[in-house]
Image (cartoon, grey):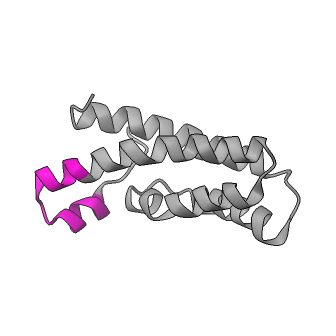
Amino acid sequence: MSNYNLSEVKEMAGGDEDFMKIVVQTFLEEIPPDVESMNEAINNDNPDLAYQYAHKMKPNLQLFGLELMDEVKVIEAWAKAGKKKDDVPQAASKITKKVNVASIALKRDFELE
């Protein structure tokens, strides 16, 4: 059972398999490095930079049905309101795990290396 949902990608691609593959490839090229940069920013106590990466990933996370909006909001709130950082590592960890699992599954499902 994969943790992603391609219904929105399929809708966007209008059944064009090649286009879907490009969208998946773009996700795989951009999102894992962004997650890494977001985690680095969190570790370096840089809420503004963490916000930028979390915010930038949001459309892609939604597009792939990863249901991580609550976690992204935690990171955004930390940056915007300077709210306690307590929940941030947990949120970041959930985003990281979900993206990693999705990336492995997408590579497999689309036969991408």
Tell whether 109 sits left or right of 67.
left
Residue at the image point whose x is 22% and y is 38% from the top = 110
Question: Where residue 46 sits: x, y (%)?
Answer: 77, 53
- Main SS of the magenta part reads helix
Residue 12 lies in the magenta stretch: yes
Residue at the image point whose x is 72% and y is 61% from the top = 48
Residue 106 lies in the magenta stretch: no
Q: Name, please, the residue furthest toward the right.
A: 84
Question: Where residue 103 sits: x, y (%)?
Answer: 40, 38
In the picture, the quarter occupied by the C terminus is top left
Question: Where residue 73 sits: x, y (%)?
Answer: 67, 65
Rendered position, 59 above or below 88: below
Rendered position, 43 above or below 80: above
Tell whether 69 sits left or right of 77.
left
Tell whether 51 sits left or right of 67.
right
In the picture, the quarter occupied by the N terminus is top left
Q: Nearer the viewer, residue 48 or 72?
A: 48
Residue at the image point whose x is 32% and y is 49% from the top = 26
Question: Where residue 90 sits: x, y (%)?
Answer: 73, 45
Q: Number of labelled discs?
A: 0
Q: Quadrant of residue 105?
A: top left
Q: Name, please, the residue furthest toward the bottom.
A: 81
Which span of residues is magenta-colored? 7-22
Residue at the image point whose x is 45% and y is 62% from the top = 62
Q: Nearer the viewer, residue 8 or 83?
A: 83
